[in-house]
Each structure stands twice: as C-alpha cells, then as structure tokens.
Image: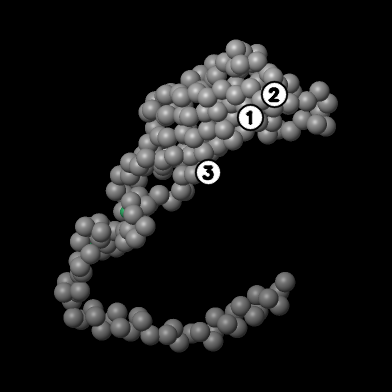
Amino acid sequence: MLSGPLVIDTHEMGRHPGTERTLQLTVPAPAEMGYDVYAVPEGSTIEIELRLEAIMEGLLATGTASARAVGECVRCLEPIDEAVTVGFQELYLFEAPSTPEDADEEDHVLEDDQLDLEIVLRDAVVLALPHNPLCGPECPGLCPECGARLADDPEHTHGEAIDPRWSALSQLAEQPVPSADQSESDIMSDDSKE
Ligand SMILES: [Zn+2]
Ligand SMILES: [Zn+2]
C-alpha cells in the first residue's frame, strides 16, 4: 500500500475511458521539494488542482500546484520567500507492462487503484525552481570590501579609503603583464608533449 499526503485513491472513479474527476487538495509538502538553497519547506502548504482522466492505458493526471519557495539569494544572501506555481501532467498506467522490454523506469503505475503524485510533483517543482535564486533579477550582490548589500546602498564606494601610496601600485597592476610572450611559449611546449 502506498502512503503519504500525495497518495490519491482512484477506486471510486473506475477505469472507463473518458471518465473525469477534478480534485482540490491541500497537503503538507513532503521533504526535498527543491534544492538545498531553494525549496518548498517540508510541511508547508501545497494547494493542488488536479484533473484525472481515464484513458485506455491508465489515468492521465493534469494539474497545477501552488506553494511557497524559501531560500537565500546566491549573490547577497537575502532571504527569498516567493509564491511558485508549477504545472504537471503524467500518465499513471493501470498495469505495469508485462514484458520487461516494454517497461520504462520512468513509468508510473497505479497500485491498488492508488496514485502517488509525490515524484511527479517533486520533478515539476525541481524543474521550476532556479538553481541560483536571486532576490531580484538585477541583484548587485555584496561589496567585495566590506560585505555590505549593494542593493541597499548602490552608491557606496571605498575609493577614499585607499592610501595614495597604494593607488600608484594598483595602477601598475592594471598594466599588461610583460611576461605574455613567455606564457605563450609555455603553452606551445605543452602542446608538443602531447
Ligand atoms: Zn540579492
Ligand atoms: Zn563596502
């Protein structure tokens, strides 16, 4: 028997092609809905609108899930807490294919007329959430010198703090490195070894 908040019993629905059923679910989020840096927190509310439609081979599940995703901006570490809505569609076979050649690891199969949405929902959420969440599309990140959040203080500079004796050195550092020829010949000798 399947268990979990995302297991749906479809027994009453029957298997006649064309039969449809619409469901509204409010469920606690399972663990690992997203990435370490950005995810739907375990136990937070997910609202799901689901349509089940019987076709010859199985039940076609089509739906949208609305939840909150929580994480940190990868540039400035500001907390992010945003509403996310993801769509999904998956066929749940009535029976597992009888011959191994027809079976696919990706297949979803009903068990005792029960359908488990968890994997399908997780895949949809993982696909929808960015790997590198940002607090805003233009987040300038943190000041490399003092760690201040630049979005809060865009004008902020440390120009005055540099000792004039060091500024001459920093100008030197910006000039082309004179050993460029040397490094080029190093690359060529590396090639000849291969
Ligand atoms: Zn940010
Ligand atoms: Zn700074």
Tell me: residue 1, above or below residue 174: above
Q: Residue 30, how many percent across, how many down?
A: 46, 26
Q: Secondary structure at mark 3?
A: helix
Q: Quadrant of residue 112?
A: top right
Q: In the image, what residue occupies the spot 69% across and 27% down?
A: 55
Q: Residue at x 65, y 75 (%)?
A: 190
- Tell me the number on the disc at residue 60: 1
Residue under the image location 35 percent in, 80 percent down: 173
Query: For the residue carrying disc 3, how many other residues have a C-alpha within 10 Å: few (<14), some (14-19), or many (20+)?
Result: few
Q: Earlier in the sequence, mark 3 or mark 1?
A: 1
Q: Residue at x 20, y 81 (%)?
A: 165
Location of the C terminus (image quadrant):
bottom right
Distance of label 3 from label 1 (alpha carbons)? 20 Å
Q: Give the numbered dot on residue 17.
A: 2
- What amino acid is at disc 1? Leu
Work out whether 190 lies above or below 104. Answer: below
Q: Which mark is residue 127?
A: 3
Q: Earlier in the sequence, mark 1 or mark 2?
A: 2
User: Mark 1 to mark 2: distance in Å?
Assistant: 10 Å
- Tell us which disc is closer to us: 1 or 2: 2
